[in-house]
């Protein structure tokens, strides 16, 4: 299949401090990316800067300008993870310097694929020196993704070579790979600010998907619900933004204080923050020492920095130049997806020591010597997508939403669905309500626990018509979420394994049965409620005086003989039906009724009339309008 030409591209600078990155961007775009007062005063880039560049041929791309000083590498990393092409800047009067090397190592760890080198300040050195510097640059780039990259001689001050640089960038852009704009969108936030008349605005590079004006969004890890009120792409108002563009988004109902760099904006239901992530890490050969178990490190992913400790899986440590599997336990919630790239720096002194790929963004806690964990992570790293999805299903405590499984697998949702179709057909997986799937082994384990819990409940509570749904969920499924539990019960009911109502679940064939003595007590209670009509005593009084236990009273409620009107208030079903019939007749004739008029109509007291009307409201028989009720549908 021919490679699709990229429509949306972000170019990111890299290089040592004072090598002329910002001056070069200004010469290319006319934009001074140093926006802070301190940057102007010190003549040094401190934070990320952004500009748009119209290339020869008319293509518009975004540029992220990063600080070169090692003290601000955290800011550089916030901008580096979203770039498509690297613009490595080396000053001709100094050549390759420490941050040149570190930035190059970072780009390699992030698996940058293409870029070029701008040899700046060519106006301040002679031709012979330029040749020596270029040779030095080539030597430093050997074995890296920039080994065969163009080296363009340029001066941001005189403008010499700027047009040639733009032409070289245009050629690389034409060859760049398109980011996927399908699937859920994701916007790691790199700036948050307020605009008068608009409110809170965030900016970032859209790394996946498409977001449109009006779309509901969730800000993670804060889990704040909002809406994309307005969108700008490369500084121009737009109806939508696609992956690979610089985006400014005006958020509805959000305060600036609620957000920060490192927040991630996604559609509702996509991604979950976690304090643990499983990763595959590659240590730099230049790392000063091995990565040891429980060492504290800084992990950079997206625009966020997280501090935490590592659990080295499968070995005692990972040496410089080595590779291995690690569980990172963070002090702050991490928002990531499988396949995300990251950089690891030592906690102190801060130095880049490695980087790699996120394998599982929401794992369980692992023990360092568990061989099964290594096997599962091998599958996540090297396995086929179908194997990966089956492994996700197998590890899930219950049904898994297809959308969530796709996110954990780092696959487009459309592709994940195609693989799930095969798993449903050939591997015996089950498709459940709510667009969920479950592995047959997980299904068998869960249904076994549910059936056992129901058998135990029926044996211990023969007078109960079934087991309360929430009690069953807690007892048998280890707190499976309600939607997943509901989908599981629906499938079991379809298979004839149980019978579920709104509130109760029972096994087929189970029926509450009273002994002769219990039946007589039940008849006594029911008769007292029939005689009382709409002025029944409280349930507590009936239990205490007539029964001595709540089981028989509950039996009458579950079989529909008694109706719960409000907490601690029950009436006989016949009385409720008579009151409802009288109310419907009155409303059909008169249209409306007040509390006092209803009290006179049924001959009861306000103690029962108000709860009874509220009960009819809850059953959507009536609706309150001011101090009156009307019949719904009238």
Image (cartoon, rainbow, N blue to C red):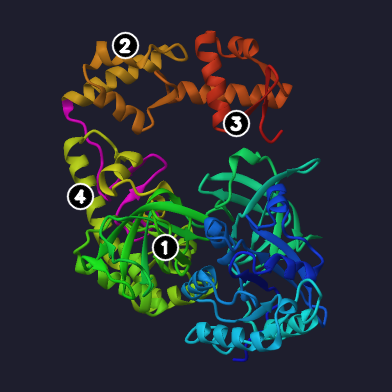
The relative height of residue 262 versus residue 406 in the rendered view (above or below) is: above
Q: Residues within 10 Å of mark 2 (few under 14, many from 20)?
A: few
What is the spatial separation of the Cα atoms under label 3 and label 4, in whole angstroms?
39 Å
> Which one is in front in this view, the residue at disc 2 or the one at disc 1?
1
The relative height of residue 225 versus residue 137 in the rendered view (above or below) is: above
The relative height of residue 634 versus residue 568 in the rendered view (above or below) is: below
What is the spatial separation of the Cα atoms under label 1 and label 3, in whole angstroms?
62 Å
Label 1 close to label 4 by CB (< 8 Å): no
Q: Foreground: 275 or 42?
A: 42
Q: Position of residue 417 (x, y in %)?
A: 49, 72
Q: Foreground: 260 or 634?
A: 260
Q: Is residue 23 left or right of residue 368?
A: right
Mark seen at residue 621 = 3
Q: Quadrant of the C terminus?
A: top right
> Which one is in front in this view, the residue at disc 2 or the one at disc 4?
4
Q: Foreground: 217 or 555?
A: 217
Q: Earlier in the sequence, mark 2 or mark 3?
A: 2
Q: Position of residue 542 (x, y in %)?
A: 31, 14
Magenta residues, as a range?
489-516
Q: Residue at x 41, y 46 (%)?
A: 482
Q: Residues within 10 Å of mark 1 (few under 14, many from 20)?
A: many
Indicate the secondary structure of the residue bearing disc 4: helix
Per the image, the residue denoted by label 2 is: 541
Per the image, the residue denoted by label 1 is: 344
Q: Residue at x 36, y 79 (%)?
A: 382
Per the image, the residue denoted by label 4 is: 452
The answer to whether one can see residue 172 in this image is: yes
Indicate the secondary structure of the residue bearing disc 1: strand
The reply to whether the magenta stretch includes residue 29 is no
């Amino acid at each position: 299949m021919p490679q699709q030409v990229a429509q949306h591209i972000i170019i990111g600078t890299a290089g040592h401090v004072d090598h002329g990155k910002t001056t070069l961007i200004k010469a290319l775009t006319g934009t001074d990316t140093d926006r802070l007062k301190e940057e102007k005063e010190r003549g040094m880039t401190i934070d990320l800067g952004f500009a748009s560049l119209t290339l020869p041929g008319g293509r518009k791309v975004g540029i992220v300008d990063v600080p070169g000083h090692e003290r601000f590498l955290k800011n550089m990393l916030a901008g580096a993870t979203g770039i498509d092409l690297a613009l490595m800047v080396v000053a001709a009067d100094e050549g390759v310097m420490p941050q040149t090397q570190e930035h190059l190592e970072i780009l390699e760890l992030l698996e940058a694929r293409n870029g070029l080198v701008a040899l700046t300040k060519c106006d301040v050195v002679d031709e012979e020196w330029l040749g020596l510097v270029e040779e030095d640059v080539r030597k430093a780039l050997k074995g890296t993704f920039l080994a065969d990259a163009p080296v363009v001689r340029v001066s941001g001050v005189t403008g010499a070579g700027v047009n040639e640089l733009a032409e070289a960038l245009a050629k690389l852009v034409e060859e760049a790979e398109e980011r996927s704009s399908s699937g859920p969108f994701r916007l790691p936030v790199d700036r948050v600010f307020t605009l008068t008349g608009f409110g809170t605005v965030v900016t970032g590079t859209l790394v996946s998907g498409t977001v449109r004006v009006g779309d509901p969004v969730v800000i993670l890890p804060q889990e704040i619900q909002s809406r994309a009120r307005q969108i700008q792409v490369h500084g121009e108002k737009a109806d939508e933004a696609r992956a690979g563009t610089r985006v400014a988004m005006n958020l509805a109902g959000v305060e600036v204080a609620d957000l920060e760099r490192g927040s991630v904006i996604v559609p509702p239901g996509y991604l979950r923050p976690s304090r643990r992530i499983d990763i595959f890490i590659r240590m730099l050969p230049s790392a000063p020492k091995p990565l040891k178990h429980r060492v504290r490190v800084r992990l950079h992913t997206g625009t966020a920095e997280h501090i935490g400790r590592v659990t080295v899986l499968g070995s005692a440590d990972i040496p410089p130049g080595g590779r291995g599997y690690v569980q990172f336990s963070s002090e702050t919630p991490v928002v990531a997806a499988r396949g995300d790239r990251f950089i690891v720096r030592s906690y102190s002194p801060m130095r880049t020591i490695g980087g790699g790929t996120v394998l599982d963004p929401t794992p369980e806690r692992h023990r360092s010597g568990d061989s099964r964990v290594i096997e599962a992570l091998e599958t996540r790293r090297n396995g086929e997508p179908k194997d990966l999805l089956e492994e996700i299903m197998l590890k899930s405590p219950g049904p898994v939403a297809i959308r969530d499984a796709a996110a954990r697998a780092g696959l487009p949702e459309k592709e994940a669905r195609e693989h799930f179709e095969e798993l449903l057909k050939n591997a015996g997986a089950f498709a459940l309500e709510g667009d969920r799937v479950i592995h047959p082994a997980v299904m068998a384990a869960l249904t076994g626990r549910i059936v056992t819990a129901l058998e135990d409940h029926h044996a211990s509570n023969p007078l109960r018509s079934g087991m309360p749904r929430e009690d069953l969920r807690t007892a048998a499924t280890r707190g499976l979420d309600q939607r997943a539990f509901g989908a599981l019960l629906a499938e079991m009911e379809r298979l004839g394994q149980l019978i579920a109502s709104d509130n109760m679940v029972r096994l087929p064939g189970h029926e509450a049965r009273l002994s002769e003595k219990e039946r007589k007590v039940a008849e006594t209670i029911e008769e007292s409620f029939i005689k009382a009509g709409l002025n029944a005593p409280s349930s507590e009084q009936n239990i205490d005086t007539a029964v001595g236990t709540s089981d028989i009273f509950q039996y009458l409620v579950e079989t529909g003989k008694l109706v719960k009107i409000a907490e601690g208030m029950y009436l006989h079903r016949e009385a409720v039906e008579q009151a409802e019939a009288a109310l419907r007749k009155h409303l059909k004739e008169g249209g409306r009724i007040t509390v006092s008029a209803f009290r006179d109509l049924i001959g009861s007291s306000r103690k029962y009339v108000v709860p009874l009307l509220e009960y009819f409201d809850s059953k959507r028989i009536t609706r309150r309008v001011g101090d009156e009720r009307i019949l719904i549908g009238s």
